[in-house]
Image: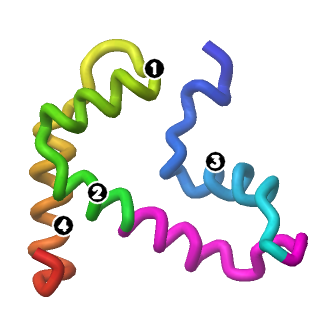
Amino acid sequence: MAKSQTRAFIDREAFQVVLDEVKTVSGTPYEDPDTVYGDMSRLVVGWLARQSPAEIDVEYKRAGWRGRANSRALHEAAKRWLKTYRPSAT
């Protein structure tokens, strides 16, 4: 398996490689990648917490991933993260 296929997008280094290829509207690189990374992480957690495990499975398959996602674990962990760190969002 190619190295690019084994790296998770949420991996900070892999995210930075991808973000380096994305430019701002003005065509310049993003100056604060940590904020973009944090925003992405929070958005993913929020999305996972609000989907049912069955809906997560559908998206997993739609993305072309093989096997089964740990949908229930993803959903429950995201809900717990929100409850712990962003109780106003639950």
The residue under label 3 is 14
Mark 3 neighbour class, 10 Å CA radius: few under 14, some 14 to 19, many 20 or more: few
Mark 2 neighbour class, 10 Å CA radius: few under 14, some 14 to 19, many 20 or more: some
Identity, as a three-letter code, of the amino acid under mark 4: Trp
Between disc 1 and disc 4, whose residue precedes? Answer: 1
Between disc 2 and disc 4, whose residue precedes? Answer: 2
The residue under label 4 is 81
Q: Is residue 63 left or right of residue 36?
A: left
Alpha-carbon distance for marks 3 and 4? 23 Å
Q: Which residues are magenta?
A: 26-42
Q: Is residue 34 magenta?
A: yes
Identity, as a three-letter code, of the amino acid under mark 3: Ala
The residue under label 2 is 47
**Front-most of residues 5 and 61:** 61
The residue under label 1 is 64
Helix, strand or loop at label 2? It is: helix
| Quarter of the view holding residue 64 | top left
Helix, strand or loop at label 4? It is: helix
Mark 4 neighbour class, 10 Å CA radius: few under 14, some 14 to 19, many 20 or more: some
Helix, strand or loop at label 3? It is: helix
Between disc 2 and disc 3, whose residue precedes? Answer: 3
Please provide percent x and percent y for residue 21: 81, 54
Is 80 placed above or below 34 here? above
Alpha-carbon distance for marks 2 and 4? 12 Å
Please provide percent x and percent y for residue 28: 88, 74
Q: Residue at x 83, y 71 (%)?
A: 29
Alpha-carbon distance for marks 1 and 4? 27 Å
Between disc 3 and disc 1, whose residue precedes? Answer: 3
